[in-house]
Amino acid sequence: MHAITAANLRNAHGGESMAHMRYLVWGAEAEKEGFHNVARLFKAISAAEKVHATSHFRELKDGIYDALCASTAVFGLGKTSLNLQGGIMGETYEITEMYPTYLETAKFQGEKGAEQSFHYALAAERTHAALFQKAKRAIDTTGKDPDLGPIQICKVCGWTYEGEVPDKCPICSATREEFDTFAPLVYVK
Ligand SMILES: [Fe+2]
Ligand SMILES: [Fe+2]
């Protein structure tokens, strides 16, 4: 594999792995503050980042070795509104700078597997940014946990969708069986 695409895969794996963990931490904070739907959103998106981290790792088929992995990541733990801002920042960086650049580089270098892995991630991160924005808007204007329907995660490409399970993933064409659903809790009074 070309060295630059291999480095980009390692860096993207690092970034996605950290995002996976960061969203679990921020999800626990949302839970503590009583924002159960935001907690569920963080947990669902954390699962999508795991799909990407796994996919990037699997594309590195160049043996076992040590390497420096340099990933930009958002750090900090505050209240949920601030954590959502952190989520928006991280996703925006991935959408506007990181993945478009990695994707074009993989295309230029003829690295088909990496190209697909970056393409899947880029498409999913767009949905993540939009969902975090929706949640932050709701919390900032009402101070209440936002209404959020079931969150669907495609286990093949990480595409994320609020609503009922689609028949087919619009990004990777996976069937409905390939989706994990993070459904709202139903409280029995
Ligand atoms: Fe994301
Ligand atoms: Fe998919």
Image (cartoon, rainbow, N blue to C red):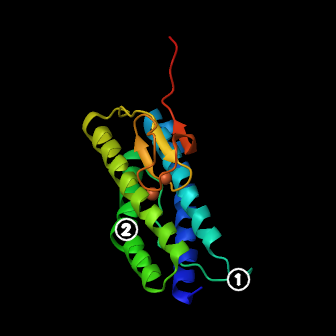
Q: Quadrant of residue 99?
A: bottom left
Q: How many marks?
A: 2
Q: Nearer the viewer, residue 124 or 79?
A: 124
Q: Position of residue 102 (x, y in %)?
A: 44, 77
Residue drawn at (46%, 62%) of the image:
120
Residue pointed to by mark 2: 93
Q: Position of residue 88 (x, y in %)?
A: 36, 57
Q: In what element is the residue under mark 2?
A: helix
Q: In what element is the residue under mark 1?
A: loop
Residue pointed to by mark 1: 66
Question: Could you classify mark 1 by the number of other residues whose Cα lies within 10 Å: few (under 14), some (14-19), or many (20 or more)?
Answer: few
Q: Nearer the viewer, residue 4 or 36?
A: 4
Image side of residue 13 versus residue 126, left or right: right
Q: Position of residue 138 (x, y in %)?
A: 29, 38
- Given the image, on which type of amino acid does mark 1 rest? Asp
Q: Residue furthest left?
A: 141
- Establish if 146 lies above or below 124: above
Residue drawn at (52%, 40%) of the image:
176
Image side of residue 2 versus residue 138, left or right: right
Image side of residue 180 versus residue 61, left or right: left
Which quarter of the rendered picture does the N terminus lie within?
Answer: bottom right
Residue drawn at (55%, 75%) of the image:
9
Q: Position of residue 55 (x, y in %)?
A: 59, 64
- Establish if 18 lies above or below 4: above
Q: CA distance from mark 1 to mark 2?
A: 27 Å
